[in-house]
Amino acid sequence: MPASAEAFVAEVRPGEVVVEAPVRADAALQFIGRIHTPWKSPRECPRRGDLGGPVCRVEIFPPWDQALWGIEKHSHLQILYWMHLARRDLAVQSPRHAETSSGTFALRSPNRPNPIAASLVELVGVEGNTLLVRGLDCVDGTPLVDIKPETCPHATPREADGNSAS
Amino acid sequence: MPASAEAFVAEVRPGEVVVEAPVRADAALQFIGRIHTPWKSPRECPRRGDLGGPVCRVEIFPPWDQALWGIEKHSHLQILYWMHLARRDLAVQSPRHAETSSGTFALRSPNRPNPIAASLVELVGVEGNTLLVRGLDCVDGTPLVDIKPETCPHATPREADGNSAS
């Protein structure tokens, strides 16, 4: 099967439960930037973020570049992004590497009713309106939703979400 | 000043930068449940979540209650919720307890272009379509956006977001 976004979105595996309800629009998200990574398709993405992984670029669009003031004081950030290639209709999923099915909320799969990832990254540099970070695992071009200081202890790299195949 | 939501939303402090751009609708969020807490207004909320705090109830609406299957295997969860009382137009903020102003992305204030909180909680029970958790700090009635297994180390309670005054 070609590693295309379409193939990724269409696939439903045995044991999975698809919800028929249409997506409601209870609130509007605005994309405030774009994430640049080395991975051009979901199947190329690492399975989870790695704080020792490659440097990725988080570009912030105006006027929100003004909101970066003071960001360099934080060694680690939480990056929220929109997993635009994910399904939003799976209530139960059968991850590729798992033996059994699980409810969507018991998984960190990209497929969820609101496909927002929360990834821990290390901030390694700031260039104008762009952050250089390690720890992402999403596909190149992923829309950015938020940036927050991360307050989790960092003794060991933790699993992070990804806009990647589950 | 009365502790009303309106007073919370309207206030702009010295040193803050308001962005004039209208909110775009690049993606639609659907509310999948509602959070029940002891705090009836933002000013009653604790400043940050506390894993030793009171038990709160996270109610999941159908059909997404099906997605809870297996959730009890996880001791800690990440709860994403929509801070419906927050401002979305502040690029630089002067938090009440800080000496200087900071960019919005250098703060965990509820006021941000996409007011989504990511809170660490301990799962203490499941009753049908409702999770009993400790660690939240949001106002009663806050809309639920997502639930994920938390993978951060838990040696010490960490700061969590809140739909509370900053």
Image (cartoon, coloured by chain):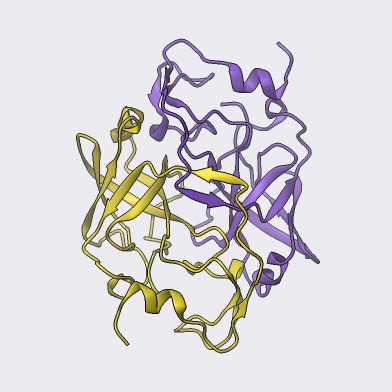
Chain colours: A purple, B yellow
Q: Nearer the viewer, residue A96 or A147?
A: A147
Asked whether, in this view, residue A22 is left or right of residue A127, the answer is: left
Residue B68: image x %, image y %?
Answer: 32, 32
**Residue B51 in view:** yes
The N terminus of chain B, quarter of image? bottom left
Q: Is residue A110 shown above or below B123?
A: above
Identify the residue at the far right of this view.
A127
Q: Is residue B154 shown above or below B85?
A: above
Q: How many marks?
A: 0
Q: Residue at x 68, y 29 (%)?
A: A42
Q: Choose top left, top right, bottom left or bottom right for residue A149.
A: bottom right
Q: Residue at x 54, y 19 (%)?
A: A96
Q: Is residue A57 shown above or below B85?
A: above
The C terminus of chain B, quarter of image? bottom left
Asked whether, in this view, residue A53 is left or right of residue B99, the answer is: right
Asked whether, in this view, residue B47 is left or right of residue A6, the answer is: left
Identify the residue at the far left of this view.
B127
Q: Nearer the viewer, residue A150 or A116?
A: A116
Residue B29: image x %, image y %?
Answer: 49, 45
Q: Residue at x 45, y 84 (%)?
A: B97
Residue B142: image x %, image y %?
Answer: 34, 56
Q: Choose top left, top right, bottom left or bottom right for residue B19.
A: bottom right
Q: Residue at x 45, y 67 (%)?
A: B86
Residue B48: image x %, image y %?
Answer: 37, 68
